[in-house]
Image (tube, rainbow, N blue to C red):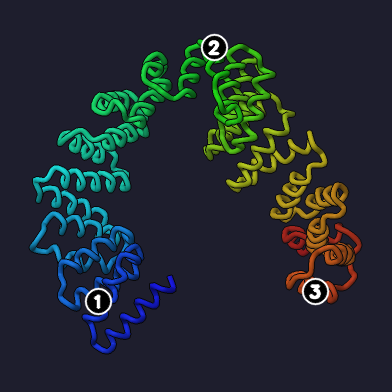
């Protein structure tokens, strides 16, 4: 990089002396070494333009947009070059320039003008590909499908077949995906991507023999045999696998043990699978299947809830956790997950209900105690909040935050003596910070008044009644 900067600096010095031909010559001498650097290409393109070397200038700008596709300057210069000379390149470049400026709908029209302006099938396919891709980005999948079919009408194209398969599969139209991939495989029998994509769809559709007839993937073959119920053949293939330490192997051997109803070994394999892929929802889905086979209704719904949570489908997850809770009201794990989801959704009424349920099964659960204390504090029910704060302190006496919360609560109840006591304990435990220093100054000014929560302020209604009672 230092050498390139030196070359550019030397060229600039020559330019400053109006020695443009020498500056360009210097850049050309170093072109092969630095032609993959955007800064270098931009500099040599500008010099070529200065020296009226139009063909060289165009070449440099074209190379620049390849390695720096967001170069507005390059596109502007190329538009000037192509205007009136090459309609296809002009409209293609204008479309890309408009995309950079956020004018996506207008770019669609330019891509159409590009392929309408040429008879070259390769150029037509390129412009249609770019238009189809833009339709996908805009969420207009049917229009993208139409473009990919028009590309295939020109001549078979393996990428277009794969894109069509993707689009149909994404819209859950596996039948159409299978049909178009079958056409693709007829034209490209050696294309492994088309072949294995089609084989996977066959498995998902229960067409196991069709999948086995085309796949060359040993793992997919095992999966098809397992789904087909051919457990002996699946085990034979599993035993022949070289890599028995992969997550894929453990998931498949777990499926084998599930098929033969050896649930303990199945769980062992699921555990190994989850150690390798802890964020994969499949582990919980497999555990749910075991629970279902053993008529464990709570376990089934709880594990399905974990599966949906990992997929970030929290609505379905919450429904599963609630079903688990119905199956076993004492199952605290489901309650904890329900609480997590409702905390994210900021649903205080449901939170209170499940905090209380969690405390029935786990009276010392600090998260539930904190939640109940916060709920009552937010409702200005400080006496009730104290009950949970004191329990929190009993369970975790070294937790600095509980003393801060107790101080706040007693302060609201006008018991400054207990408020100061708890604030001082908090200050002795909490790390030094601007906030703790402010609290320390506040505590020093507090008077030791009040004897307990009975000194809580009277409500407005009580005050009005006293006035009328006089």
**In the displayed structure image, the side of residue 142 where residue 226 appears, left or right:** right
Q: Earlier in the sequence, mark 2 or mark 3?
A: 2
Q: Choose between 144 and 269: the one closer to the eye.
A: 269
**Which image quadrant: the N terminus?**
bottom left
Q: Which residue bears the numbered disc 3? A: 442
Residue at 70% from the left image edge and 50% from the top image edge: 375
Q: Position of residue 442 (x, y in %)?
A: 80, 74
Q: Which residue bears the numbered disc 1? A: 24
Residue at 82% from the left image edge and 49% from the top image edge: 392
Q: Is residue 304 visible?
A: no
**Label 2's element?**
helix
Residue at 65% from the left image edge and 16% from the top image edge: 295
Disc marking residue 231: 2
In front of the other: label 2 or label 3?
2
**In the displayed structure image, the side of residue 49 where residue 16 appears, left or right:** right
- Per the model, the C-alpha gap separating discs 3 and 1 is 72 Å
Name the outermost residue toward the bottom: 17
């Amino acid at each position: 990089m230092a050498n390139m900067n030196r070359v550019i600096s030397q060229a600039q010095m020559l330019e400053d002396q109006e020695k443009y031909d020498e500056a360009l010559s210097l850049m050309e001498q170093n072109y092969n070494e630095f032609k993959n650097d955007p800064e270098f290409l931009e500099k040599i393109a500008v010099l070529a333009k200065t020296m009226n070397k139009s063909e060289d200038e165009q070449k440099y700008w074209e190379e620049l947009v390849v390695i720096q596709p967001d170069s507005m300057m390059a596109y502007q210069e190329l538009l000037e070059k192509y205007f009136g000379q090459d309609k296809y390149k002009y409209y293609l470049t204008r479309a890309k320039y408009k995309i950079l400026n956020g004018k996506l709908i207008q770019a669609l029209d330019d891509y159409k003008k590009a392929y309408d302006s040429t008879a070259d099938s390769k150029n037509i396919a390129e412009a249609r590909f770019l238009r189809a891709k833009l339709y996908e980005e805009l969420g207009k999948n049917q229009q993208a499908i139409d473009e990919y079919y028009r590309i295939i009408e020109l001549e078979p194209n393996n990428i277009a077949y794969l894109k069509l398969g993707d689009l149909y599969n994404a819209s859950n139209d596996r039948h159409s995906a299978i049909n178009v991939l079958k056409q693709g495989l007829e034209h490209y029998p050696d294309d492994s991507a088309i072949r294995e994509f089609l084989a996977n769809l066959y498995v998902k559709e229960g067409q196991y023999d069709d999948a086995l007839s085309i796949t060359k993937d040993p793992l997919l073959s095992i999966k098809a045999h397992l789904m087909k119920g051919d457990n002996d053949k699946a085990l034979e293939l599993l035993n022949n696998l070289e890599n028995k330490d992969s997550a894929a192997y453990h998931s498949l051997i777990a499926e084998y043990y599930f098929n033969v109803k050896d649930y303990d070994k199945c769980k062992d394999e699921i555990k190994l699978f989850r150690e390798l892929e802890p964020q994969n929802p499949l582990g919980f889905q497999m555990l749910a299947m075991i629970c279902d086979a053993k008529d464990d209704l709570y376990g089934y719904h709880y594990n399905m809830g974990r599966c949906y949570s990992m997929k970030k489908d929290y609505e379905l997850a919450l429904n599963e956790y609630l079903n688990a809770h119905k199956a076993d009201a004492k199952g605290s794990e489901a309650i904890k997950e329900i609480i997590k989801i409702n905390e994210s959704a900021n649903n205080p009424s449901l939170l209170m209900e499940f905090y209380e349920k969690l405390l029935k099964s786990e009276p010392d659960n600090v998260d539930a105690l904190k939640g109940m204390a916060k709920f009552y504090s937010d409702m200005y029910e400080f006496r009730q909040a104290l009950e949970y704060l004191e329990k929190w302190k009993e369970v975790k006496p070294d937790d600095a935050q509980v003393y801060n919360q107790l101080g706040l609560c007693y302060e609201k109840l006008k018991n400054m003596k207990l408020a100061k006591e708890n604030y001082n304990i908090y200050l002795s435990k909490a790390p030094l910070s601007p906030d703790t220093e402010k609290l320390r100054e506040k505590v020093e000014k507090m008077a030791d008044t009040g004897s307990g929560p009975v000194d809580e302020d009277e409500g407005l209604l009580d005050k009005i009644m006293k006035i009328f009672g006089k």
